[in-house]
Amino acid sequence: MGAYVSLEVCKETTLAALGGIKKGEFEGDPDIAGIGIFASFLAVTSFALCLSCVIVMLNMLKHRVVPFCCWGQGIGEPAKKHVTKPTFSEILQAMVLSCSDAQIFTGAAYAVTLRFFAGCLISAYHYNIVANMMLLTCATHLMAISVVRNYWESPWLGGLRVICKTGIFLVTGLLLANQNASLEDAFPTEIPKPGTQNSLLFLGAACFQSQSPQLQHTLDESFRDLKGSIVLSSPGNHIEGWNKFLVILLWYSAAIAMEIAMFIRRGKARNGRRARIVKRFWTIAVKLVKGPFEKFSRKSTPIEASPIAPPPRASTQGRKSTDERTIRGIKRVGQYTLAVYSLGSIAICVWTVVESGMYMAKLRLWVQRSGWLALNDQGLNPENDPTSFGQRNEEPQRWQEYA
């Protein structure tokens, strides 16, 4: 994944000077920057984003979070009878989960390829493409864990998903942090201005990396300078997408905590461990909410004790109804909090998809117009051939020989 790769390690396979190649001889890589690969990554993430927007709106309508809405089931109303037929929202959630699961394998494929096979061969240009594609993958995973309500329907499968997706986040962090090596020449991430013919983007990525991992160092620099990291995406060197990665990572951590809480709340055993945890939680929550109000009411309206009649005692039924109203109020606040959280996830994903997609599109366009890419036998840019599926153009000719 680019970790522990440097110019010293890759002396025999990494291009260290543009004098080694001429214009029109730089080999493109349709498996990374091909129009089909780029479009498929962007399409899957955009499709999951659109579905997530619909899911969030349906959930807000269902729980009457939308102002002036009376449709759906309100807080505290009796739940409908259990039905086996999936709802429209559940179908959409399954589709979002499928998009996320599919990108687990594509992201893992890129990680394994860069770590064990192409770490010394990949150019800085293709490295930037891979890093931003991994960001799109992280955005898809964030949407899945944020909007899918039955994520923990199968605890073992949900746990496996969390482990795999956390690994994808770690790989993405390593890819981005390796662009922050403290070397004389910073990793080229900026798109050159129109008309510029030469760029360090065509050099090997290992020319700008260090043999030591940079993730911890980059995270430390990011927390020391949050403005430079979040606003400028520059924890040291300018890393395209580092600010998005930090925000997604923080939101993803909150999502895991929230999903664990939902998993506990949905304990099916009537008197099981999770049910007892939920009951204990509501007991503590009611005391925390009602405690200050009860103290204030006792101080403001003191009860005069009578020497004959015993002090009045609150009825158990009245106390129970008061507790139920308090729980309904807490649930209402929870639903609004969940709605704000879901809308925040959507906003982060929109930001990532738009900016990363535009960055990759502009970077590909500049490389295409620079004149450095080698053309295929038909005189075309192999990275712009949507019919090749990322393969060499000699393959169709070979099949034609057998036809």
Image (tube, grey):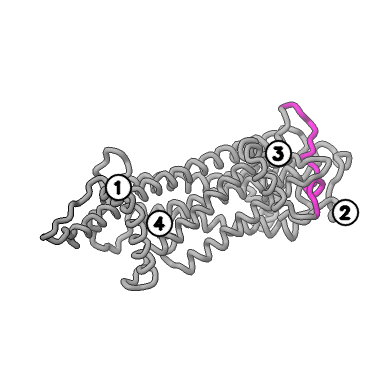
Tag in front: 3 or 1: 1
Magenta span covers which residues? 194-211
Of the two numbered discs 4 and 2 in the rendering, the one whose residue sits closer to the viewer: 4
Q: How far apart are the two marked residues, 3 and 1, measured between alpha carbons? A: 55 Å
Asked if residue 106 is positioned above or below residue 240 in the image, the reply reads below
Instruction: Determine whether 293 is above or below 157 in the image.
Output: above
Q: Is residue 331 magenta?
A: no
Which amino acid, by three-letter code, is at mark 2?
Answer: Glu
Left or right, residue 314 beside residue 351: left
- Residue 167 x %, y %: 61, 59
Circles 2 and 3, Cβ within 8 Å, touching? The answer is no
Q: Main secondary structure of the magenta part?
A: loop
Q: Residue at x 48, y 57 (%)?
A: 257
Q: CA distance from mark 4 to mark 3?
A: 37 Å
Check residue 296 in the rendering and tell me which mark sits there, or answer none. Answer: 1
Return the disc, 4 or 2, that comes first in the chain's sequence: 2
Q: Earlier in the sequence, mark 4 or mark 3?
A: 4
Q: Earlier in the sequence, mark 1 or mark 2?
A: 2
Query: Can residue 361 be seen from the camera position used here?
Result: no
- Other residues around mark 2 within 10 Å, as few (<14) / some (14–19) / many (≥20): few
In percent of width and height, residue 310 lies at 14, 61
Q: Residue 34 has which mark? A: none
Callout 3 touching callout 1 (CB < 8 Å): no
Q: From the image, which quarter does the C terminus lie in?
A: bottom right
The amino acid pointed to by label 4 is Arg
**SS at badge 1:** helix
Q: Residue at x 68, y 39 (%)?
A: 234
Which residue bears the numbered disc 4? 149
* Residue occupying the point 52% across, 49% down: 251
Please name the amino acid that badge 1 sits on: Phe
N-terminal label among 2 and 3: 2
Horizontal arrangement in the rendering, residue 296 relative to residue 195 (left or right)? left
